[in-house]
Amino acid sequence: MAKKGLISLFLFFLFCSPGWAGFASKINKGNKLYKKQDYDQALQKYIEAEVNNPGSPFTRYNIGNTYYQQSDYEKAVAELNKALSSKDNKFREKAYYNLGNAYYRMNDYAGAIEHYKKALEIDPADEDAKYNIEIIRKRMQENKTNQQQQQDQKKNKQDKNKQDKKEQEKKNKENKEKRKEKEKEQNRKQQQQQQNKMSKEDAKRLLDALRDEENKTQQKIRPVQGGGAGTDKDW
């Protein structure tokens, strides 16, 4: 973003009374330091000049520009707004323009465009202001597109997470059913084994009972002793 330069008080100084010499001297010293990019010292000179002439829109303008160079954009906006109290439209146009720059740096694109437009209302031939508006509009469109893409990506990710969760739940359910089926089969086998074991025991008991019964039967039968059971009677 192009930035309007500092207001020079050289002509202003020519029309001032000697009593204003201290004020103008501090402003001009501040301007020299500003051009050397010694912004801390320049700001100090502008603040000292403000003490000599409180509320001067020229001082506020230069203080605002210095805060801008220090990346303190909120303070820059506050000072540049105070500079708008000037009745000089050319000066006000520069202040509006630099306010647009400050709002841009704060990512307030709507605020930047608003102030560039105000600068154009005063000077419709300000090509820098027109250019900056076009650049910001393109940036806003890019941001809108990026935001839409990010939202789409976020939605796709959420949908995928939901689908993954659904599939995982289905898999967990299937695994649970398999475990239940496996446990059921294991229980069935255990019951079968138990039944087989009981059948063998029953068979053994039955066999033992049969053997006992056979032994008892054999004990009741006595073998025949001698040649025969009959004898001859005497008649």
Image (cartoon, rainbow, N blue to C red):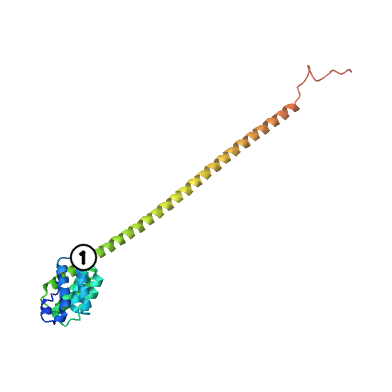
Q: Is residue 64 above or below residue 150?
A: below
Total marks in image:
1
Give the residue displayed 17% in from the left and 77% down from the top.
Answer: 22
Examine the rendering and report whether any part of residue 40 can be seen: yes
Q: Residue furthest front?
A: 18
- From the image, which quarter does the N terminus lie in? bottom left
Q: Is residue 54 above or below residue 150?
A: below
Mark 1 crowdedness (10 Å alpha carbons): few <14, some 14-19, many ≥20:
few
x, y (%) of residue 110?
Answer: 22, 73
Q: Quadrant of residue 228?
A: top right
x, y (%) of residue 75?
Answer: 25, 72
User: Along the line of sight, which residue is nearer the eye, 171 or 54?
Assistant: 54
Which kind of residue does numbered mark 1 sit on?
Glu
Examine the rendering and report whether any part of residue 1 can be seen: no
Residue designated by label 1: 142
x, y (%) of residue 10?
Answer: 11, 76
Q: Secondary structure at mark 1?
A: helix
Q: Residue furthest right?
A: 235
Q: Is residue 181 above or below residue 2?
A: above
x, y (%) of residue 221?
Answer: 75, 26
148 on left or right of 16: right
Q: Quadrant of residue 85?
A: bottom left
User: Along the line of sight, which residue is nearer the eye, 88 or 102?
Assistant: 88
- From the image, which quarter does the C terminus lie in? top right
User: Along the line of sight, which residue is nearer the eye, 81 or 119?
Assistant: 81
78 on left or right of 231: left
User: Along the line of sight, which residue is nearer the eye, 234 or 28?
Assistant: 28
